[in-house]
Image (spheres, coloured by chain):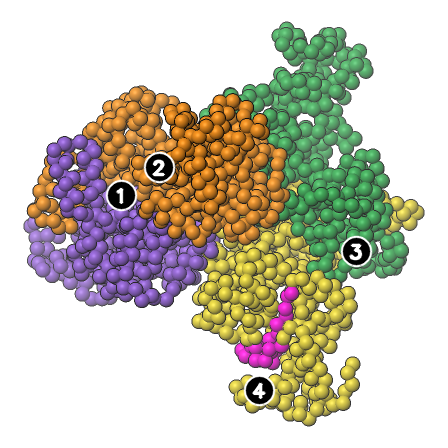
Chain colours: A yellow, B green, C orange, D purple
Amino acid sequence: MNMSFLQELFTSITQRDALQRRLGAKKNHSDHHDLVAACEELLNSDGEAASIVLASRALEIYRGLSGDEKKAFFECLARQFAADPDAIDRAYRFYRKDRSNRNLATLFEVAEPRRQELLRRLNLAQGATYELVLMRQDFLTLMKEHPDFKPLNADFVHLFGSWFNRGFLVLKRIDWNTPAAILEKIIRYEAVHKIEGWEDLRRRLDARDRRCFGFFHPAIGDEPLIFVEVALTKGLPDRIQPILANDQYDIEDPVLADSAAFFGISNCQVGLRGISFGNFLIKQVVQELKQELPNLKNFVTLSPLPMFRDWLEKTYRQDPTQLTPEAQAALAQLDDPDWASDEARADQLNEVIRPLAARYLLKEKNSAGLPLNPVARFHLGNGAELHRINWLGDVSDHGMSQSAGLMVNYLYVIENIERNNEKFTSNGEIVCSSSVRELSRNGRKLFQGEPEK
Amino acid sequence: MNMSFLQELFTSITQRDALQRRLGAKKNHSDHHDLVAACEELLNSDGEAASIVLASRALEIYRGLSGDEKKAFFECLARQFAADPDAIDRAYRFYRKDRSNRNLATLFEVAEPRRQELLRRLNLAQGATYELVLMRQDFLTLMKEHPDFKPLNADFVHLFGSWFNRGFLVLKRIDWNTPAAILEKIIRYEAVHKIEGWEDLRRRLDARDRRCFGFFHPAIGDEPLIFVEVALTKGLPDRIQPILANDQYDIEDPVLADSAAFFGISNCQVGLRGISFGNFLIKQVVQELKQELPNLKNFVTLSPLPMFRDWLEKTYRQDPTQLTPEAQAALAQLDDPDWASDEARADQLNEVIRPLAARYLLKEKNSAGLPLNPVARFHLGNGAELHRINWLGDVSDHGMSQSAGLMVNYLYVIENIERNNEKFTSNGEIVCSSSVRELSRNGRKLFQGEPEK
Amino acid sequence: MNMSFLQELFTSITQRDALQRRLGAKKNHSDHHDLVAACEELLNSDGEAASIVLASRALEIYRGLSGDEKKAFFECLARQFAADPDAIDRAYRFYRKDRSNRNLATLFEVAEPRRQELLRRLNLAQGATYELVLMRQDFLTLMKEHPDFKPLNADFVHLFGSWFNRGFLVLKRIDWNTPAAILEKIIRYEAVHKIEGWEDLRRRLDARDRRCFGFFHPAIGDEPLIFVEVALTKGLPDRIQPILANDQYDIEDPVLADSAAFFGISNCQVGLRGISFGNFLIKQVVQELKQELPNLKNFVTLSPLPMFRDWLEKTYRQDPTQLTPEAQAALAQLDDPDWASDEARADQLNEVIRPLAARYLLKEKNSAGLPLNPVARFHLGNGAELHRINWLGDVSDHGMSQSAGLMVNYLYVIENIERNNEKFTSNGEIVCSSSVRELSRNGRKLFQGEPEK
Amino acid sequence: MNMSFLQELFTSITQRDALQRRLGAKKNHSDHHDLVAACEELLNSDGEAASIVLASRALEIYRGLSGDEKKAFFECLARQFAADPDAIDRAYRFYRKDRSNRNLATLFEVAEPRRQELLRRLNLAQGATYELVLMRQDFLTLMKEHPDFKPLNADFVHLFGSWFNRGFLVLKRIDWNTPAAILEKIIRYEAVHKIEGWEDLRRRLDARDRRCFGFFHPAIGDEPLIFVEVALTKGLPDRIQPILANDQYDIEDPVLADSAAFFGISNCQVGLRGISFGNFLIKQVVQELKQELPNLKNFVTLSPLPMFRDWLEKTYRQDPTQLTPEAQAALAQLDDPDWASDEARADQLNEVIRPLAARYLLKEKNSAGLPLNPVARFHLGNGAELHRINWLGDVSDHGMSQSAGLMVNYLYVIENIERNNEKFTSNGEIVCSSSVRELSRNGRKLFQGEPEK
């Protein structure tokens, strides 16, 4: 499977080289007015041959723009490239009179912002899809300060949803036989547990007890969209440090593993934010792994609990009195940066923090009624079960400061995924193990006379 | 390039095998009500995992439906899966009051027929893209008798336009090293000059003086979308029979060729009608050929003149008196099926038919002001020039009855393509050689005192 | 695995095209004297660059020679390109005096026929390996009438043994996704049960219940060396006709099969006769199949019994009286060409022929003490067991006239292969099932008072 | 071409993984007696199935041996696995009586050391070819101290010559799209100008102005045999430091280059010493480059002059008086380690050193009458011409101490290669440019009244 990597992805080295040369070209002296003019010309063009040339030219101008010029261009897009109000009024009048499918089709057509057709036409140029992803990356940065850009975002999302639909994604194993051009991107894009360099990467891809898979898109070539790192283990792992260590091997032969632990999922393309792949990725990777290693019994994550420490701080500092004195005393230990290395203190904290984490995961919801914690939301939304909360699972500085050292196992039980997914998305129900439930019950006792919600 | 054929296209034999087994499954006993119910469930589903399963189920039911049941299903789609009128009214009221981008976005969203979201969700299933292409194939057949289905067609076109945009198409050379599974489709799909079997195909792909290229789509696998057959020749060819002959070689070594003649372009997927690829195909093939064979100077078609004979019959029979007596006498020869083998008659006809063909190509327009002849419309629309009209270029029964034996060379001059394309699409101007212009002038003299339009 | 077919085998289409053009070149007017001169020059050349050119030239001359000229060339090779007797005498004298390793090495070196170095140097030319295989094919034909050519044959075998050693062979699945250029060779090379054309081939490669694998050699490109056809079945098959039938499917899904039946093994390169691949092929195919289809329990052949009918005729006609009158009467039925369709006769014959076949397989030996039957010798020599003799297993004309309609199952029991192989090769012991043993015992009773040998 | 890299080389990741696991296995407790016994058993084995198992076992024992045990094993090989003297005597007697081809064949056969058949049989095991290369690597180290091992070396060379003949080598471009598993070997094996790490490698492979090609062997998988590094430049380069610098680009687009400079050729497998590939490599690389970049006019090396400084020291110190006083004075500057940075001194030295280098290259010969300098011997032997001697071409410590800072351009003029090759190999004639000849003439004047040899 891995063997056909290059074939499927690189249509031609020459093309890529050419692209890189082009991308690296010197800034031109065009401004956003030139670009807007080029876009108008592209939209007015009748012939496809001419359109391709115009699209290439427009994208070239865009690449040469400064940040300010880009902002000005997006402003124009949002304002000038909307739909024509008169056409909408007219189409609606017809539709109002005769609610025929035909009139509806016309209304739908004229209500479409011209930006969408513009983006579709820009996509005609060679290599345009990836350049539009980069354009949205610029755009998302600017949108933070310009909420009026949002309508344009909807257009990007609409089109990217079509272009990056699941059927077009290609799952590829990434290992030490993967081209270096892709591996250096894995180093760069790893978002969960930093890869320190080529030697570190080599360990992460060691065929003995690691696997890595990514989604690629044929029109984007060797740019991964998302990838997942997997550790093959005996038993469910509860700590990340042994997995990240360069010199430790739980097993020397993958056939000895009974568990596959997903310990890092990294989205690679900022410009594709909001287009979800992770769900499909995990499911396909589970299938691949089962086929390669029939001995695997458990598919589980080893996930951080980001923002838990924040939540803890807020809850604890704002109103510590809601907790029992014992709980308050225990939590006070957190102020000491070295608490983890003091066994007694750590034990004392363990009694409080894991139960609170269980409650945090099960009870704290966002406005949509889904778990506050984004990682929980993702995996539970994919049909996983909340399986275990691991004490001192990540003792790195980052792990301590984000997750209070906890790591969570979410379990993917193949035959339950669909049912769990449905329960969760329809009424927010979280499937969890009895041990987490027990922890949560214990958590209740940490509160001063608080009745269970 | 050709070497990576399989790699790029077939993600896995196993998957295809599985698909074929599934496609070949026995008919189920569901009817269109079941399918509509499954579609509603799919549209109402919240979770992606569940959606994939529901989409697969819906497509499976569809595959098992009879023709009548399919018709009933499309009727439901056209009627029940439109947009919600109340939501449109409401959104329009808001937009009317405040013509903000946001209100426009809402209007656009609610005006979208639910069918589009349904098709997008169906596309989540494994292998769904191709099954939806087959669904549209069924649909187009039924639409002929049910014009009220048309709105649904617009939805197909809208989505297919996104899914099959140019950037996702992969150009592949097709030759004797191509997998048999693809070659048998080339035999089946060849639409211009029938391929009689494997031996005939072998000649068409002979590396000495033939080339063949096709567009493929990664999500459609080994199903070609369109392909073009090329003869490498010395000089521009004027007759098709020597090219189709199994035992004739104009050259034995491709480097000796100065011309590449496109003698057959076949669309393969009825379900993709209206999504144009031919334009891009020709341009990319020209690039490939120039790279492989730098000696090539001319890129030209050897094209039929379909419907010319019909036009001739109609014009001639309805009002023969508009022609000069000599022209009338000559055309009368056409009634004799063997005229081509009688040199004197053939010469007499030549004097009349080629000039008339030149006028037919240059003067006869459809309602959009473009050439009546579809092949001319296609190549001229791609930026080609009308170069030569060849007497007795196709003496097969089909060629005689369709094109009165004529074949046309359209010339692709790389540096003029864009300009020609623009002239043609903006004001219908046809670029043609002086010889064709001369022919057309001669044609004028065949008419009884008719002043030039 | 199959996906990387082209990649592994064809270094470049262009190269092959060029080769074919070269191979198809017109005959030159050189004779064997020119070739011998070119060979001498090649042997005397000091530089590698020059050697490559000289080797190419020599092979080109060879290709242009007539049959008679080739014969003359081989005569020269056998006579003039032997070792130098004086050098041998000298080296032997030294070795005789001092039996050092060094003197032995010199003796070995000078005793090597110059032909071997010549063949090695010819092999420097681009594509030479395959041309030398073709040269040996010519040679073997000529050797039949010229036993004095035999020393040259030993040189070929010596070198081919090195060049085609097992580690350099690549196993490839052959199916409908295999390039047509290879498939047409499968049609041509099938030696056991003729393939009637592309439709017939398609059935033989149907992924539902057939498999086909071949050995390829990287330097020989797309020319298969040997291939085996496999039927996936429920239970061990006893008849070949249902397997060859185009429209019968034992199973529709390969996972339902419990048995893999090897029903045809074809050597493709006459020029490689005597270099054995079949043994390795079967073993690797068994491994591939087990990996793809873990449900497979039995690996078995469905083999003809060539020359059995001949043996029967000879034994029966030369001395019918050694058989019992009943056996004689039964065998007399064989003279009627339609006996197989007459149930009574067939039954009568069954009682005689299968026991005789069992004895033929178990008792009739060649001068080396191995089974007279070559197919039995091959499979038993590979470590298979003689499992079953099937009545009316091949009712084709060829099957009736060669094997008296019988087909034999040889069973490959993975864990016994080595042990069986050793028993067989060390003392000719044949491992067989109790039913075949029983048949053989019955066979004894057909003889007039003959005591068991 | 590059795209099919993995496909052609790695038959399967799994196999390699398995191999690595096996190679990494713990030492067993066998000694060389066990191995010799296993080898005898292998030689005596009749069946192929059994042979494969025995070969695997023998290689496994070998891998587990200590250095001393390996030495003992090679001693046994050299002594016990020679040919049988009695058989040789007998065969010679027959041959003496009747000098037939047949008797010669027998003599040749019995004179072959049993070691050769042993090595051939060992090569039956999966992955054995590479393990035998590693075995020879061990062997070559030991042979330095044990000249009596040499006969065994001849056997290795004999067989490796067959197994690694030119037709089986596959040329592959190596670039940033090459699998990391191969790239890390490039870093490790680079022998001329050390690669400092992945970033340095990236520069060496930059598609803008660098190329790298290697030879691979299908049975050896991803282990390169030899590779060459190429710089694309405008004009012939005379200094190595700008080429090795990470941040300098002579050109940004390869099509601008008129010259391809080979600046590093590295043999990768110690165990293949004596099997020459470099000659073929350069010629094929020149072809590849010409095809990709038709603008290239010059193919040249930028080569060190190893051992020149040594030669200079010896000649200069042993007998300085043969030089003119001026030359003596100039050469004395060499003792100052910083001479290169002092322009006056450097100029003074330039006048002496380059002429002496020209004489060194043209006049100093080894016992075979070929140039003393190994790099010159290699390139001139390949048909290159001695083109230019560059002052301060390599100012690294290594370059100064080895080559007195000089670098040499050897020019490959395609149409002269064969002729040069022949001149050089037949009578040691060196083709050189007029400027080098001029330098050499100047060199003569540096000698005290020495008449030209």
Instruction: State the image coordinates of residue C239 (x, y, percent, origin top left).
Output: 54, 36
According to the picture, the residue beneath numbered tag 1 turns out to be: D382
Secondary element at image label 4 = helix
Instruction: State the image coordinates of residue B356 (x, y, percent, origin top left).
Output: 70, 17
- Measured Cα–Cα span from mark 2 to mark 4: 82 Å
Foreground: C208 or D443? C208
Marks 3 and 1 close (CB-CB < 8 Å): no
According to the picture, the residue beneath numbered tag 4 turns out to be: A346
Residue A411 within the segment the image draws in magenta: yes
Relative placement, left or right, of D183 versus C99 is right
- Measured Cα–Cα span from mark 4 to mark 3: 50 Å
Q: Which residues are magenta?
A: A389-413
The chain under label 1 reads: D
The residue located at (15%, 63%) in the rendering is D332
The chain under label 2 reads: C
Relative placement, left or right, of A389 versus A250 is right
Q: Amino acid at mark 3?
A: Glu
Foreground: C190 or D366? C190
